[in-house]
Image: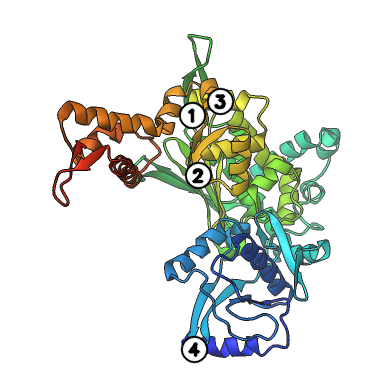
Amino acid sequence: MTTQELNDILNRLCGLEAENEIVEFKEAKSNYDFTKLGKYFSALSNEANLKGKPFGWLVFGIEDKKHNIVGSIYRSKRKDLDSLKGEMANKTTNRISFIDIHEVNLPEGRVVMFQIPAAPKGIPTAFDGHYYSRDGEELVPLNIEKIERIRAQATKEDWSAAIVPAATLEDLDEDAIALARKNFKNKFPDKADEVDLWDNITFLNKAKVTSKGKITRTALILLGKDESEHLLNPADAKIRWKLMDELNNDIDYEIFGIPLILSVEKVFAKIRNIKYRYMQEGTIFPTEVAKYEPFSIREAINNCIAHQDYTKNARINVIEMPDQLIFTNQGSFIPGNVEKVVIEDSPEEFYRNRFLATAMFNLKMVDTAGGGIKKIYNFQRARFFPLPDYDLANDKVKMVLSGKILDLEYARLLAQNKDLTLEEIMMLDKVQKKLPLTDFEEKHLKSKKLIEGRKPNFFISLKVAQKTGQKADYTKNKGFDKQYYLDLIIKAIKEHKDLTRKDVDDLLWTKLPDWMTEKQKKIKINHLLSELRRSEVIENKGTFGKPKWELK
């Protein structure tokens, strides 16, 4: 926006008689609480959706009663202001963040205007796992009625349930229908004898693949002949499998189209699910497991099919790397938070493609009881492998499934420790992957003495390290007491008469904690030398820029 456009908007907002559900003013001191900012982000985003507006405004530097401009020094450096976008995305549903953050410098003072996007259709915006809204000018939890109104937006029109007028039973694949019958009988064994007596259209109606004998988009996606794919245009109902090496070079690829009920097995057959060998404690014989649990592969592919936003006219991708599989589908993750789905073990309440999901459930392709993702987590836990990684950015779901152990002792004993919940293992999984912890996770793990270190460089604590055989790693991470380093410097100067800065660096570098960066190690050594100098233990007999430390 131009400066004039921003001034016009600001004048219009200040001209309001009072704040409303999508406009909030704050004087905002320099240390304005980030959590409160996040709550307002969630509230204004949800209210903008409910009001049918594209965005709401949170304005800093304005007095909230009389709307006088008082100025704000909140994050006065532009880079600090811009960093808010990433910080907010890390805490919100589907990594939603500000449309933009505008600064307006006026004679009365600096004004910061946060432009907050409306919650996407069907998906309320949460901050740190909680939903907020406005009751007039008040910040309040998002009530059930408003949650239902937003979520209902996703169910008003089910793309997958639409009838395809030009399609007939002849457009469906016989082998696909045969497999669908077999799966249906396995899913509902009490109806097996009946199923054999049904003709195809009766069976498809009963399985809720067709609607009153008419061919739906769901029927074509799951059971359609390859040559009938044009009936789904412009949707691109295909799965692309790609094989890549450790340098991200393409080695091979293949594209599989409808019927997807058959293509799932074809993609599964492409994946090189070779044996992975490791030694278990207490035996000299190696244990062998497949790199990937077959259920996890099929569940991941079928989830992509069920949740793909076909209106985006994009393909589902399955990328095979040497030690991991990557699954991607277009469309936001409707539950909003993967950890919440896993920990609460609750079924999904809303589906992008409800008709398709129901058909896939009936054909034993997915589990609408909501436990599929948690089963993948538990399979990884039982195999001592890292837990799945989800990336929900850019209106896309990306799931990474690892096929190797990061640390056998660590993973095995933590996964088998009955004192640890799955939620705690998910937190510790972040630590071993060097991923950031939330304030709650940090506090919880430290309270149980499971981790040590300073944000963001946490490491497994002595308690866990002793259990998992990571004692050496623990010592390298924790380092030594400060006095040890001071004594080492003094001892070296006594032996060699003097030390240059390079000598001191060489002396201490490998003894400092492994988690420290080069910059942090240099700062640490600076502090140690400064402390000895201030204590008049050593003095600099060198020149500026070329210190030579001697005992005083």
Q: Amino acid at mark 4?
A: Pro
The residue identified by callout 4 is 107
Spatial separation of the CA atoms under disc 3 and disc 2? 21 Å
The residue identified by callout 1 is 405
Residue 349 in percent (x, y) is at 77, 53
Q: Mark 1 or mark 4, which is nearer the start of the sequence?
A: 4
The residue identified by callout 2 is 435
Residue 450, quarter of picture = top right
Residue 137 in percent (x, y) is at 75, 75
Spatial separation of the CA atoms under disc 3 and disc 1? 21 Å
The residue identified by callout 3 is 463
Q: Residue at x 57, y 23 (%)?
A: 413
In this orientation, does residue 470 appear?
A: yes
Q: Mark 3 against mark 2, which lies toward the viewer? A: 3
Residue 448 in percent (x, y) is at 63, 33
Q: Mark 1 or mark 2, which is nearer the start of the sequence?
A: 1
As displayed, is residue 443 above or below residue 9? above
Q: Name the quadrant of the C terminus.
A: top left
Q: Amino acid at mark 3?
A: Lys
Q: Mark 2 or mark 4, which is nearer the start of the sequence?
A: 4
Within-10-Å neighbours for mark 2: few <14, some 14–19, many 20+: some
In the drawing, does residue 456 fall left or right of residue 265? left
* Kind of element beneath mark 2: loop
Residue 371, quarter of picture = top right
In the drawing, does residue 7 fall left or right of residue 119? left
